[in-house]
Image (cartoon, coloured by chain):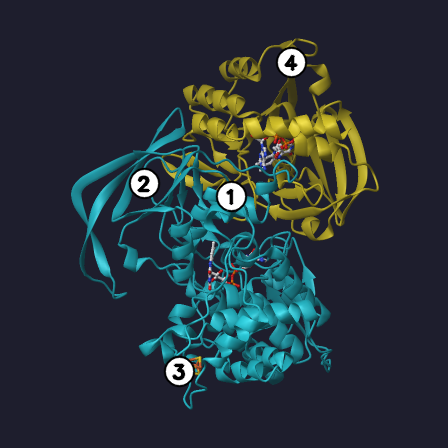
Chain colours: A cyan, B yellow
């Protein structure tokens, strides 16, 4: 058996001081070798494990036949952002985790192949001119994250006039303000969105639904037949401990937004600053925590700790990000739970953590962290809180009839919310999840919206 | 793009601008603010909507740092990169018959729409307005139309009484009584007004101005401690009852980027 092809990467020592993309992508030769490893299974486990059921063996076969454009279109049918998903999907938990080769050998590098096709198509401008038969009905999409974009693309193809409203001054949601440049170059996100504009989708920035316009106004004044809410989970969760408002304590959202959306790494050329000291602790263990830790390192922090209350095996982040973080010198301080942030003159000085041990398994199947009587304290210049996000309540507040659950997530029945004609999907429904799940939801919701409008 | 329809220099440090933003204007209520970006490298900075009509909003900004100075360089016919709003919870206009309003410096601008709303519901208003000097007093003529009495003071005595607004306020509180106070200005002024009013069992509404980015509750930069709890000023405020606000913490938080602001200002010199 040929070994799994390794992704070429920038050297850790060099890349941890700049914002260039870490994973460099396969060249054609590597793509061919990797594709040739696929067994073209009769009952491909990878397809079942893919949240949008991309026909993986088919696109791999097309690669082997040099039919890159067809290979790309095979993916594009089910996933409009291959260059993005190839980079950020947790493949080891999805397609690659299920790949039959993984049982005895190593799974196919499906993500890397997907990324190659995405990039190749952007470079060679593959997209065919799609002929869309207009039906003169209008729909509105709230939020331009993966859920909104996927919904917009799907429903536009059915002939609808589609307007996308975005609160921020750039489009892409978390792809723009959350996930850093070194993992997902912003030009890729922009190019993908530019293609959607070419499909005839209209994008409006600086429009906050619930403030600038209400759902009611969208229906009554703008005559949309249906509305999709893909407003994501943008509200940062707090630790709820003493000292969280000291100077030097960031929520990951603020820290990452300053760098990614506002480009603070180019300060003062870009006018928004960000400040990071020598020693930084990041609390949390997911993708957000890894991104914050690696960003802090790139901004010049000498020591960066990831403080997490369980063990290494329980880290929910993508495997690749954890590996990259370790290579870049991020230190993991595990089984620690912050209980107090200690400051002086309103400025952070140190963090006090309770030492945890692992107990019985909890509902997620992971061992529950149990507090002990021991504590550890260490000196830090910054603390970045990255323990999760919940849905933003702005839309709910201006739309009393919209039903949400105790966590603020919009309640849906088959993508339909409690208000007729209003649909929702992505993080706003599930809570913080993944890019591909949000896109899948957007795509499915489009089908329901079309059906609904046809009954009007 | 958001076109500047009119611009008036209120004094050498403060400009009034009328900006074309029909979507924002339509849903604006007193107490709302916008976030703007002057150009595509610009910071997102919050400014109160002082007035609005069907098509435009009026903002008044003090040129204290890089972004507000860049804004000041724009003229009628130029456009701003981004304007988003209306943000924040509209001011809660309470059914009171008497009100004392306190404005400090450019705080007179965000105070105006609220005082106007009180006037519109028939409240009798005394206004204390203070600034460093005569030149920096703004909106006096507009306020004159809607308040009963206007008390002016300046730090240097160049107009009205010499001294801080709290000096005048204390005298008024000894002479008469009010149902409510509202104060907008520098944090230190609001803190002192709240503390003074506490002695007279008078409640004070204030408007907070922490550093903001998105203005939608996403980043948490704008958080303030009130009565030991954390609030996001952009979505929970910016107006709050003043009594339990941790002003000292907020003042320190506002200063977090002092050094970086200085770097930006140096750049301004080069840009000329
Ligand atoms: C730092 C970070 C790293 C991540 N890394 C990964 C990863 O590696 N792999 C992965 O699969 N997932 C990752 N995720 C999760 C993933 O990004 C999200 O699950 C996904 O973006 C959700 O998509 P969405 O469209 O539902 O919401 P979002 O991407 O959050 O987009 C919502 C959009 O709606 C806008 N909006 C909100 N309210 C309004 C309103 N009222 N009016 C108008 N617009 C509004 C927002 O500004 C935003 O642009 C990461 C998340 C973060 C924060
Ligand atoms: C809700 C709200 C309403 C406001 N309304 C007005 C108004 O009507 N008129 C007016 O002149 N000013 C108003 N301000 C203050 C105004 O936003 C700041 O003066 C401006 O952002 C300063 O930016 P700068 O780059 O010119 O100055 P800098 O030199 O960068 O900073 C000077 C000071 O301004 C504050 N500041 C800096 N950046 C921000 C930011 N992104 N957000 C908030 N504060 C910041 C800091 O405290 C800093 O110490 C308001 C602020 C808020 C939060
Ligand atoms: S499971 Fe693995 S080997 Fe089988 S088709 Fe999918 S990628 Fe190829
Ligand atoms: S400004 Fe970002 S949460 Fe208030």
Q: Which residue is mark 2?
A: A241
Quarter of the rendering containing residue A161:
bottom right
Considering every residue shown, the one lying at the far bottom of the view is: A42
Which residue: 62% across, 61% down? A188
**Above or below, B4 relative to A124:** above
Residue B147 visible in the current orientation: no
Indicate which label's residue lies in the foreground, 4 or 1: 1
Per the model, the C-alpha gap separating discs 2 and 3 is: 45 Å
Q: Which residue is mark 3?
A: A45
Residue B248 visible in the current orientation: yes
Q: Are marks 2 and 3 in contact (CB under 8 Å)?
A: no
Tell me if mark 4 has few (under 14), some (14-19) or many (20+) residues whose alpha carbon lies within 10 angstroms of its own: many
Q: Which residue is mark 1?
A: A17
Which residue: 69% across, 29% down? B267
Per the model, the C-alpha gap separating discs 4 and 2 is: 43 Å
* Figure quadrant of the N terminus of chain A: bottom left
Quarter of the rendering containing residue A191:
bottom right
Q: Which residue is mark 4?
A: B154
Residue A265 in picture, x, y percent from top left:
57, 42
- Some atom of ligand 3 lies within 8 Å of the CB belonging to the residue at label 3: yes
**Above or below, B140 relative to A294:** above
Residue A37 in picture, x, y percent from top left:
45, 80
Q: Which secondary structure, mark 3?
A: helix
Q: Using the rendered image, report if marks 2 and 1 lie on a common chain.
A: yes
Per the model, the C-alpha gap separating discs 4 and 1 is: 51 Å
Residue A369 in picture, x, y percent from top left:
22, 54
For disc 3, the chain is: A
Per the model, the C-alpha gap separating discs 3 and 4 is: 77 Å
**Lateral position of residue B25 relative to residue A286, left or right:** right
Per the model, the C-alpha gap separating discs 3 and 1 is: 40 Å
From the viewer's side, name the closer residue of B119 and A29.
A29
């Amino acid at each position: 058996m040929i070994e799994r092809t390794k992704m070429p990467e920038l050297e850790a020592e060099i890349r941890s001081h700049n914002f260039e993309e870490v994973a460099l992508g396969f060249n054609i030769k590597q793509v061919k070798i990797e594709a040739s490893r696929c067994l073209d299974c009769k009952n491909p486990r990878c397809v079942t494990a893919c949240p949008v059921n991309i026909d993986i063996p088919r696109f791999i076969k097309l690669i082997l036949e040099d039919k890159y454009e067809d290979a790309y279109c095979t993916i594009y049918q089910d996933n409009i952002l291959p260059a993005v998903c190839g980079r950020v999907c947790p493949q080891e938990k999805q397609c690659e985790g299920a790949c039959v080769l993984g049982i005895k050998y190593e799974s196919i590098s499906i993500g890397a192949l997907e990324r190659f096709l995405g990039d190749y198509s952007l470079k060679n401008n593959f997209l065919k001119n799609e002929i869309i038969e207009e039906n003169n009905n209008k729909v509105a999409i709230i939020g331009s994250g993966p859920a909104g974009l996927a919904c917009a693309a799907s429903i536009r193809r059915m002939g609808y006039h589609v307007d996308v409203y975005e609160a921020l001054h750039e489009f892409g949601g978390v792809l723009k303000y959350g996930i850093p440049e070194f993992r997902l170059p912003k030009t890729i996100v922009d190019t993908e969105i530019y293609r959607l504009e070419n499909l005839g989708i209209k994008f409006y920035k600086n429009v906050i639904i619930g403030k600038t316009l209400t759902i009611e106004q969208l229906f009554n004044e703008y005559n949309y037949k249906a509305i999709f809410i893909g407003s994501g989970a943008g509200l940062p969760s707090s630790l709820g401990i003493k000292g969280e408002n000291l100077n030097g304590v960031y929520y990951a959202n603020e820290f990452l937004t300053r760098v990614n959306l506002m480009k603070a790494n180019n300060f003062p050329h870009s006018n928004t600053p960000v400040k990071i000291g020598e020693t930084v602790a990041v609390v949390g263990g997911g993708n957000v925590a890894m991104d914050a830790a690696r960003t802090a390192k790139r901004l010049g922090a000498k020591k960066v700790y990831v403080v997490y209350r369980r063990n290494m095996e329980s880290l929910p982040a993508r495997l690749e990000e954890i590996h990259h973080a370790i290579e870049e010198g991020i230190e993991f301080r595990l089984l620690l739970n912050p209980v107090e942030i200690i400051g002086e003159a309103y400025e952070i000085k140190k963090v006090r953590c309770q030492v945890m041990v692992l107990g019985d398994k909890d509902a997620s199947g992971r061992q529950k962290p149990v507090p002990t009587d021991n504590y550890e304290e260490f000196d830090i210049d910054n603390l970045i809180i990255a323990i999760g996000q919940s849905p933003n309540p702005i839309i709910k507040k201006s739309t009393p009839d919209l039903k949400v659950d105790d966590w603020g997530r919009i309640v849906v029945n088959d993508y339909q919310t409690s208000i007729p004609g209003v649909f929702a999907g992505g993080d706003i429904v599930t809570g913080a999840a993944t890019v591909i799940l949000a896109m899948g939801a957007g795509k499915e919701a489009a089908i329901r919206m079309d059906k609904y409008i046809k009954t009007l | 793009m958001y076109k500047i329809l009119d611009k008036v220099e209120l004094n050498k440090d403060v400009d009034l601008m009328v900006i074309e933003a029909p979507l924002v204007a339509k849903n604006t209520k007193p107490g709302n603010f916008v976030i703007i970006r002057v150009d595509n490298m610009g910071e997102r900075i919050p400014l109160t909507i002082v007035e609005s009509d069907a098509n435009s909003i009026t903002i008044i900004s003090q040129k204290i740092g890089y972004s507000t100075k860049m804004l000041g360089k724009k003229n009628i016919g130029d456009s701003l990169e981004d304007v988003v709003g209306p943000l924040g919870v509209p001011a809660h206009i309470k059914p009171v018959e008497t009100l004392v309003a306190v404005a400090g410096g450019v705080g007179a601008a965000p105070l105006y729409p609220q005082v106007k709303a009180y006037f519109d519901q028939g409240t009798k208003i005394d206004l204390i307005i203070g600034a460093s000097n005569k030149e920096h007093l703004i909106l006096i003529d507009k306020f004159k139309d809607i308040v009963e009495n206007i008390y002016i003071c300046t730090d240097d005595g160049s107009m009205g009484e010499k001294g801080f607004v709290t000096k005048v306020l204390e005298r008024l509180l000894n002479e008469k009584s009010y149902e409510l106070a509202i104060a907008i200005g520098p944090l230190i002024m609001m803190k002192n007004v709240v503390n003074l009013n506490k002695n007279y069992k008078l409640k004070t509404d204030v408007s907070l101005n922490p550093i903001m980015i998105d203005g939608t509750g996403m980043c948490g930069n704008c958080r303030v401690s009130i009565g030991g709890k954390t609030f996001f000023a952009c979505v929970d405020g910016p107006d709050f009852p003043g009594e339990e606000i941790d002003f000292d913490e907020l003042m320190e938080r506002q200063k977090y980027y002092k050094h970086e602001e200085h770097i930006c200002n140096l750049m301004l010199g080069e840009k000329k």
